[in-house]
Image (cartoon, rainbow, N blue to C red):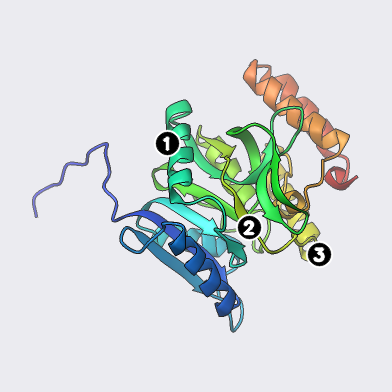
Amino acid sequence: MPPTAITPDASYDYAYSICTLVTDLEQYDACRCSFEQAGFTTADCEFLYVDNTAGNSYDGFDGINAFLDSARGRFIIFVHQDVRADFDNRQVLDACLAELNSQDPLWAICGNAGRSLDRLNLAVRITDPHGANRRVGRFPARTYGLDENFFVVRRSANLAVNKVLKGFHFYATELCFVADMLGQTAYVIDFHVRHLSPGNQDESYYAMRDAWRAFRNGKQRAYPAMSTSDISVFSAGTLRARLLTQILQRGFRFRHRRLARALVRLLSRRRAWTDR
């Protein structure tokens, strides 16, 4: 075959790939139907799922990488099986992503809840057991950690999560970290869905938090453990967590990187600072 020239403008088979880890087929069917009714039809969208109904064939990290490898959409939506597109439709998401493209062409990942870099330290757009029609923060809001109930990855960002960690927490935050390492950005957007779960902070969450933080600190860069499930219960964050976020924001913005990193290391030595 003759050689093929590549072009900057990639073509995609679908506009959206909608991906879900499934443990309950009835829940998944309800989720998929709600997105189809919101305009994400199979005319130009594909629905992909991992079947964990008989056991965990994929965990969160492996599942994310499998979806990122298999998806053929321009944008890859990751959504929990207990999320419903009951409010905003596809046109709203199209507008949100177009706004990001205009404001920040380097965006790589966005979601509906995360730790913002302003004084609120939180940006949320959701209805869940904690409250209806929750709107916290200004959108789009820069973030370094996203909740996993709903988030979108731009396929051209070429993201992936590491293959060392295993579990069902922190993989969205890991994607935000990887995006940052690649010079790209993450945001919370104004896209309203219903999440039937309040979030889950069991023993596996705390074990995953410690493992993720230790892994990333071991890579010679501390990173705020702004977690997925922690965001799901909408905790306001502790003083140390907020201070660490501000250090990262202001230090890297004004190029005082050496001082910022030294302060990050100092604060990170305190055990379990995120939940105190």
Residue drawn at (68%, 58%) of the image: 169
Q: Which one is closest to the eye, mark 2 or mark 1?
A: 2
Characterize the local packing of mark 2: few (<14), some (14-19) or many (20 or more) Cα atoms within 10 angstroms: many
Labels 1 and 3 touching (C-beta < 8 A): no
Residue 12 position in % (x across, y down): 29, 51
Q: Please give the residue where the numbered disc 2 appears in the rendered image.
A: 194
Q: Please give the residue where the numbered disc 1 appears in the rendered image.
A: 98
Disc nearer the start of the sequence (1/3): 1
- 175 vs 130, left or right, is left
Disc nearer the start of the sequence (2/3): 2
Q: Please give the residue where the numbered disc 3 appears in the rendered image.
A: 202
- CA–CA distance between discs 1 and 3? 37 Å
- The kind of residue on which mark 1 rests is Ala
The N terminus - image quarter: bottom left
Q: In front: 261, or 138?
A: 138
- The kind of residue on which mark 3 rests is Asp
- The kind of residue on which mark 2 rests is Arg
Q: Which one is closest to the eye, mark 1 or mark 3?
A: 1
**256 up-or-down from 76: above or below:** above
Q: Secondary structure at mark 1?
A: helix
Q: In front: 12, or 64?
A: 12
Residue drawn at (26%, 47%) of the image: 11
Q: Which one is closest to the eye, mark 2 or mark 3?
A: 2
Q: Secondary structure at mark 3?
A: loop
The C terminus - image quarter: top right
Characterize the local packing of mark 1: few (<14), some (14-19) or many (20 or more) Cα atoms within 10 angstroms: few
Residue 178 position in % (x across, y down): 56, 43
Q: Quadrant of residue 42?
A: bottom left
